[in-house]
Image (cartoon, grey):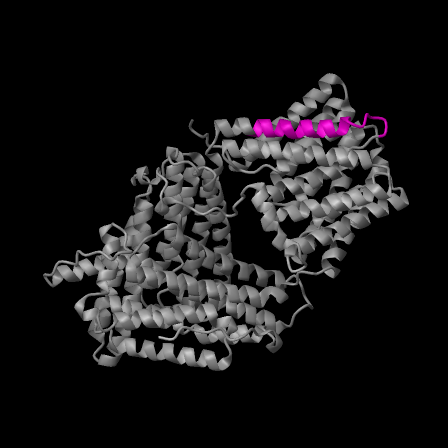
Amino acid sequence: MRTPAINSKVIATLPIFCCVMLACGFVWAVRQPAWTMPLVLGVIAGGLVDLDNGLTGRVQNIVLTALAFSFSSLLVQTMLGTGLPFIVTMTALTFLFTVLGALGLRYRTIAFGALAVATYTTLAYAPQTPWFLNPLLILCGTLLYSSVTLCLHVVFPHRPVQDSMAAAFAELGGYFDAKAAFFDPDEAEWLEDGPRLALARQNTAVINAFNQCRSALFYRMRGQHRHPRTARMLRLYFIAQDVHERISSTHADYRELAESLKNTDLIFRIHRLLELQGQACRDVASSLRADMPYAYSARLQRAMMGCQQSLRVHAQSRQAEQADQAEQGGRADQLHALQRLMDNLAGIDYQLSHIESAADAAFGENSDKTRIAAQEQDGPLLHALRAMRGQLNMRSPVFRHAVRLSLVVALSCTVVELLHLNLGYWILLTALFVCQPNYSATRSRVNQRIGGTIAGVLVGSVVPWFTPTVETKLGIIVLTTTLFFLMRNYKYSWSTFFITIQALTSLSLMGVDIYAAMPVRIIDTITGAAIAWAAVHFLWPDWRYLSLPASASASIASNGAYLERIISQLENGVDDDVAYRSVRRLAHEKAAALSSAISDMSSQPGRHSPQMQGAGLNLLKTSYALIGYISALGAYRSQIAQEARQEASAAGQPPQTQPSPAAPETPEAAAAPQALQAPEAQAFTPLFFDTARQTAQLLQALPGLDDSAFAAASERIQSGVRALRARVQGRRPNSVLWQQLSLITRQLAPCRQMLKSMTPPSEAGPTAPLQKP
């Protein structure tokens, strides 16, 4: 059925609103207000473990969730009030459920939900109620939420992937805006600072949005045949990836380009075109959210034509001005770079203008070209358990966090039991939700949790004056629980604010004096937050500066793998298969991880030297410059085919018809390697492939090389680049390939220098062997 034009956040909160409304209606009908807390907590727990999946996958998740929640709640309910056995039980459950997180996203989510249910059971405990009642009500609340989400999935099966795709195009629009800043001639001197870091942050947002799309699509593509809506979303996903590769391409040094073009209208036209294309991406996102066709902008078309005309005029004026042959060669290289930039922008324009007119049929069948990789493979449980054995050591971050969180839970329970604190398990709840695997996330949650709790208590203190009846209190619970879910992924402090009001109102329905509970809530929250902060600060702290060299090395090595895959396709034929898309995605993910590590270092003052953070920032900028130059080669793959046909036609010679054995069946893809096999390219092509492959291998081995090995490998590469310059022979494909490879090799020394400055000599690895030509 047609998806209504409703805000995605509103649709996401519909299940929780309906479930809490039904739960409160049931409590009101049977006149048992004391049942409100366990029933609503069960609904909340169900929402915490809700994962997007296909119909079969959702049913499997519901079964696993019901089993885990029943086991956890019944065990804790049985052990409550026993002192030491209860502490041991909670500690063991925490360790077990946290370690299960290593098995994959499904098990990690359900395991955390089961741990939350164990804590909810302690909060809803009342000595006068039968032992089975609280676990039963919590399970009923969870099953109620699961049933409602299952019904909504049947009605709107494709809405999650459509919302994810809209978010991806919206973030892509932001990337265009960040890239447009590089074509502001008045800011040329500061391009290496603010604009490049802003581009890195926006690239991280784009990659995260792409991963969300990939996950949503994966669960809907397991069959041989796909729903037409899924096929369309898959086509849009591939379009977004192609657009991202094109817009992330870098064809020249932007500072030199801005300085050269600052007195022309071309740079201003490119800036305007990028902003319009960014707005077009946001328009695509809006059309997806409204479930309406996207209308290509005539203004964008005119801007594209104006840019192309301006480039032609600029090229003619430059050719007329240059009389010196050497200077003319330099200008020709810049004109080639500008033409490649315009080709990329034209390719993006073509994708945007044909979003609604392209056919979806080719994406309806399962093949390697239309297959995507899952973000995490959740295999059979027995296989996952065998794979988990490798995580049972202190080198594993998951195992360290399991031990840390277990100690946090043990200390929290011990404090409650020894001091006989009434409602003291709020300490446990706070510590459990605040304690995160890394220091930065925990510190952020500590501040937001305390602030949200204090604000919630202050507001909650006046709520009873306006809600004297059971009905109005149930209404407050419906409202605050819904707002809690609406805010929990966007503003943690606001979600804490609303859940605090909900908790106080639920206690009021249970007959607890909330004015006596208010200071307890604040003290318990501060105590739990302090325990969580102390744990991540003193127990195997995840200081980002310690992992920065590894993150930087992984980012550079992934760029090398990306370059190697591109060279292979230039040699054997273009094919946007899952292997190529995966290596490209991995390069961007590793760059995003490096950006995240450097960002987290700013919240860990005093733990690293300013020189290390400065080196990290410089390496981040260099890494994104490197991936931009490599992406330009990736975007250029298909263009070679077109230029090959044009040159063959101009020479009166048909292109070769014998395809490469590894080439795809499409004519464009088959022509790509043939372009590099033309007679006039024979002297250039073997040396280019050899030098480019050496560069890719050096990037992958860079972290493990000593100075002499790097110097020798770098000198061989630079010699090859200099020899290539003499073999360009005026051919535009040769000039473009040489120019991009030259830009890539210029980043080798800076990458090496910054990696060396971040890695102490005692930690430097052994020299990695390089394959010599």
Image height check: is 224 above or below 650? above
Q: Residue at x 55, y 28 (%)?
A: 150
Residue 684 is situated, as x and y percent measured from the top left of the image, at 25, 72
Residue 133 is a magenta residue: yes
Give 231 or 468, whichever is nearer the viewer: 231
Residue 482 seen from this side: no
Please identify the quadrant where the N terminus is shown.
Answer: top left
Residue 157 included in the magenta stretch of the image: no
Residue 141 appears in the picture as rendered: yes
Quadrant of res 570? bottom left
Instruction: Between residue 769 and residue 619, name the one nearer to us.
Output: 769
Q: Give the range drawn in magenta.
A: 127-149
Magenta: predominant secondary structure element? helix
Q: In this view, does 239 lie to the left or right of 157?
A: left
Q: Which residue is drawn at 60% across and 64% down?
A: 547
Q: Where is residue 185 in the image (x, y as percent from the top left)?
A: 39, 66
**Quadrant in which residue 232 is drawn:** top left
Give x and y (percent) for residue 649.
13, 59
Q: In this view, does 534 lie to the left or right of 733?
A: right
In the image shown, does 322 or 681 lie closer to the viewer?
A: 681
Q: Which residue lies furthest to the top in this view?
A: 29
- Residue 361 coordinates in the image, percent (x, y): 31, 37
> Is 197 on the left-hand or right-hand side of 355?
right
| Image quarter in which the C terminus is found | bottom left
Furthest residue in direction left, as rendered = 652
Q: Which residue is drawn at 46% across and 48% down?
A: 210
